[in-house]
Image: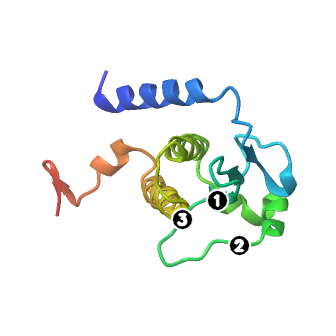
């Protein structure tokens, strides 16, 4: 088994460990019950009582994402902006972990956005094997 298969199996185990129930301090658009497939979650900061909006869509540096929840009410509007299922779940798991950190919300939001940018970029290569087969990759570094 190569290292990439180990990574994939570890990712599957991580996602399955979280995929049971979403915490109660999270809601979706219009205060509805959230699902793992929702592109928007509102996370209530239990310390301040403030709800913060998190987007779980592709993030491309320099391109603004929709600020309106109405955009996310119809799947056809945002379907091309969705991360693949595993990456979308991974981003949400990461968001749950970030919520436990004792930092201000702006820092939490930035961490989720950067993670989304990284996942968006890595989706371009579909998997690490595709990345390693690119001509720019020589030995153990990019040129």
Residue at 55% from the left image edge and 60% from the top image edge = 105
| Left or right placement of residue 116 versus residue 139 in this view | right
Residue positioned most to the front: 47
Q: Secondary structure at mark 1?
A: strand
Are dots 3 and 1 in contact, CB under 8 Å?
yes
Given residues 22 and 3, the one toward you in this image is 22
Q: Which residue is mark 1?
A: 55
The relative height of residue 135 versus residue 12 in the rendered view (above or below) is below
Are dots 2 and 3 in contact, CB under 8 Å?
no
| Left or right placement of residue 54 versus residue 70 in this view | left
Q: Which residue is mark 2?
A: 67
Q: CA distance from mark 3 to mark 1?
A: 9 Å
Q: Which residue is mark 3?
A: 59
Q: CA distance from mark 2 to mark 1?
A: 9 Å
Q: Which mark is residue 11?
A: none
Which badge, 2 or 3, comes first in the chain's sequence?
3
Residue at 46% from the left image edge and 57% from the top image edge = 111
Q: Position of residue 135 (x, y in %)?
A: 24, 58
Disc 2 packing (10 Å; few <14; some 14–19; many ≥20) = few
Disc 3 packing (10 Å; few <14; some 14–19; many ≥20) = many
| Left or right placement of residue 95 versus residue 3 in this view | right
Q: CA distance from mark 2 to mark 3?
A: 13 Å
């Amino acid at each position: 088994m190569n290292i990439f298969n180990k990574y994939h199996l570890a990712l599957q185990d991580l996602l399955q460990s979280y995929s049971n129930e979403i915490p109660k301090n999270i809601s979706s658009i219009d205060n509805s019950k959230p699902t793992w497939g929702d592109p928007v979650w509102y996370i209530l900061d239990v310390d301040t009582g403030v709800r913060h909006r998190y987007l779980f869509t592709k993030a491309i540096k320099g391109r603004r994402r929709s600020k309106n929840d109405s955009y996310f009410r119809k799947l056809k509007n945002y379907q091309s902006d969705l991360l693949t299922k595993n990456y979308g779940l991974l981003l949400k798991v990461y968001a749950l972990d970030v919520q436990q950190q004792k930092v201000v919300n702006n820092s939490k939001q930035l961490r989720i956005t950067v993670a989304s940018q990284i996942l968006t970029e890595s989706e371009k290569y579909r998997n690490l094997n595709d990345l390693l087969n690119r001509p720019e990759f020589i030995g153990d570094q990019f040129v």
